[in-house]
Image (spheres, rainbow, N blue to C red):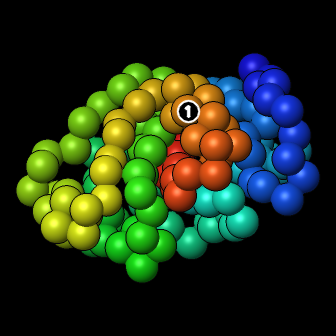
Amino acid sequence: MALHLEKVSHLKTFTGHGDGYVVVNDKRYEQAVVVSARTVQTDWPATDFASLTAEHFDYFLEMQPEVLLLGTGKLQQFAHPKLLQQLMKAGIGIEFMDTAAACRTYNILVAEDRKVVAAVLP
């Protein structure tokens, strides 16, 4: 599915998604990807929702986003709160969404100049 939002060329935005992939600024990714306004990172070691650990969430502490959107695939899933303790202590909000919703929400928030990070699982 293609996503349409007024393009802001200097920002990283989701331009599409489908079963097992997302597209950021017209580049396709089939692995876990972390997207912020200026970067796309593929070094987040998460491979699937079931194997997430607290360390996977600690990855985002240095980024200091206002909100972290976690795209969990076709279905919305929620992590146990104990995995999120460091994010909560740092005042980082986290929202769990299916991947399509995470992509759409991220695009809106980044266009509003919010400090948002989207982490999307394949």
Is residue 64 toward the left or the right of residue 23 in the image?
Answer: left
Residue at point 19%, 60% (across, down): 88
Q: Residue at x 75, y 54 (%)?
A: 12
* Residue ranking furthest to the left: 82
Toward the front, the furthest residue is: 112
* Vertical arrangement, residue 17 with respect to residue 85, above or below: above
Q: Is residue 30 visible?
A: no
Residue 85 placement (x, y as % from top left): 14, 62
Residue at position x 70%, y 31% in the image: 17
Q: Position of residue 21 (x, y in %)?
A: 67, 39
Q: Which residue is mark 1?
A: 105
Q: Is residue 84 visible?
A: yes
Q: In the drawing, does residue 51 fall left or right of residue 32?
A: left
62 displayed left or right of 107: left
Q: Which quadrant does the N terminus fall into? A: top right
Residue 96, located in which quarter of the rendered image?
top left
- Residue flagged by tag 1: what amino acid is it? Thr
Screen quadrant of the C terminus: top right
In the image, residue 44 sits, relative to residue 27, either above or below, namely below
Direction from residue 39 to residue 77 in the image, left or right: left
Q: Residue at x 63, y 35 (%)?
A: 108
